[in-house]
Image: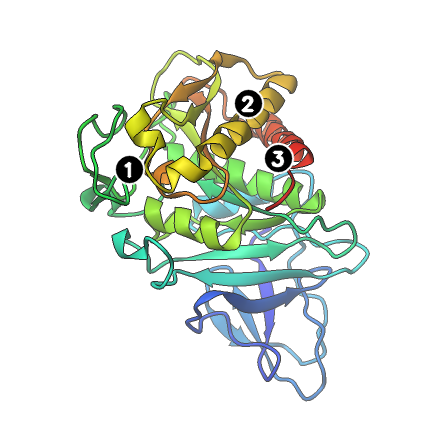
Amino acid sequence: MNQLIRRVLIGASAVVIALPMTGCVQNLKLGSDYVATSSAAAPQTEVTSQGTPSPAADGSGQKADSAPASPSSDTSSASDTASGTSAAPASDPAGESIIAETVKFDPSWEYAANSRINTGTATLYHAKPTGAKGIVVCINAGHGTKGGSEVKTLCHPDGTPKVTGGTTEAGATEAQAVSTGTVFQDGTPEAEVTLKAALATRDKLLMAGYDVLMIRETEDVQLDNIARSLMANNCADCHIAIHYDSTGTDKGVFFMSVPSEESYRSMEPVASHYEEHNALGRAVVKALESVGLKLFEGGEMEMDLTQTSYSTVPSIDIEVGDTASDHSEESINVVSDGLVLGVDAYFQNNGAK
């Protein structure tokens, strides 16, 4: 697919995607083939995935030239993201609509004052009505914020120091707003691979009936780790950040579990949510193991992260491999299958809150 066309109704019922909005509010209706139904009186604008509006060919809501992406693969996503664009998920062949909402950072959110990079937007996709679960899963393709490594944010909401090492050493009170990530042994940036995995997971979650909050769908999004977590807190039921570890031994899959350090576990919002963070992580790594991926040291490693330090919904950083891992389309497909199974397992046992 060379170019995705979205038709956005302009009038009392909808607004152009480029207009600034606050929170989870802006609606964009995508029908089968990404065509919104319209009335004769409603003028239309077409918006490409690059965000460039152009006049619609007509006001009849006819099928766009571009075909929708396949729901079972992500080859179009991979080619589009290489040029800085993103592919939207396939729509239902029966004609049910997918609703996509633009999510903008809201400075009134709790902990919002600690974010330093928050001018970007995320997209909230709603699954087709038939079979919809009413559960929103936030998928966060790790890294991908230009300039993020040059900006610092507080590691903890209360300004206390980190209790473990990692990208930022233990004892530090500030960390990179968004690190650049690692590079695979074949020269591929981690951010490129995490994006492919996120897009594939998005499509499968939507097909399974989940709504999906996509933090990043292009090469760059101007949202730091705090902003990403707050979007998940306010618009989703769980938060899964996809990463690959910087080691080079193909050591396996693990999630960053909440440190057992008492001072960390007694700090809010960690104190109220660390058990559900760990429960989500364990469900996901078990599912990834079930689809054939090996686990590293039982599948979890204690780590003090900005993400979980600010999260008020079940939230994990899942390391689905490292710089020596296969990141072919086939491998990405297995990873995304496992992530969806893990989400299923978690909500079957815990339910949405």
User: Measuring 51% from the left and 49% from the top, which residue is drawn there?
Assistant: 214
Q: CA distance from mark 3 to mark 2?
A: 10 Å
Q: Which residue was labeled with disc 3?
A: 343
Q: Which residue was labeled with disc 1?
A: 179
Query: Mark 3 vs mark 2: which is more N-terminal?
Result: 2
Give the crowd class for mark 2: few <14, some 14-19, many >=20 residues within 10 Å.
Answer: many
Q: Is residue 234 above or below residue 255?
A: below
Q: CA distance from mark 3 to mark 1?
A: 26 Å
Q: Is residue 76 above or below residue 321?
A: below
- 239 vs 90, left or right, is left
Give the crowd class for mark 3: few <14, some 14-19, many >=20 residues within 10 Å.
Answer: many
Front residue (pair 50, 8): 8
Q: Nearer the viewer, mark 3 or mark 1?
A: 3
User: Measuring 25% from the left and 26% from the top, which residue is drawn there?
Assistant: 163
Q: Position of residue 310 (x, y in %)?
A: 36, 43
What amino acid is labelled 2 in the image? Val
User: Measuring 38% from the left and 63% from the top, which residue is drawn there?
Assistant: 106
Label 1 SS:
loop
Number of numbered discs visible in the structure rendering? 3
Q: Position of residue 329 (x, y in %)?
A: 57, 30
Q: Is residue 189 above or below residue 148?
A: above
What amino acid is labelled 1 in the image? Ser
- 133 vs 14, left or right, is right
Label 2 SS:
helix
Q: Which residue was labeled with disc 2?
A: 285
Q: Position of residue 114 (x, y in %)?
A: 26, 52
Q: Is residue 225 above or below residue 67?
A: above
Q: CA distance from mark 2 to mark 1?
A: 24 Å
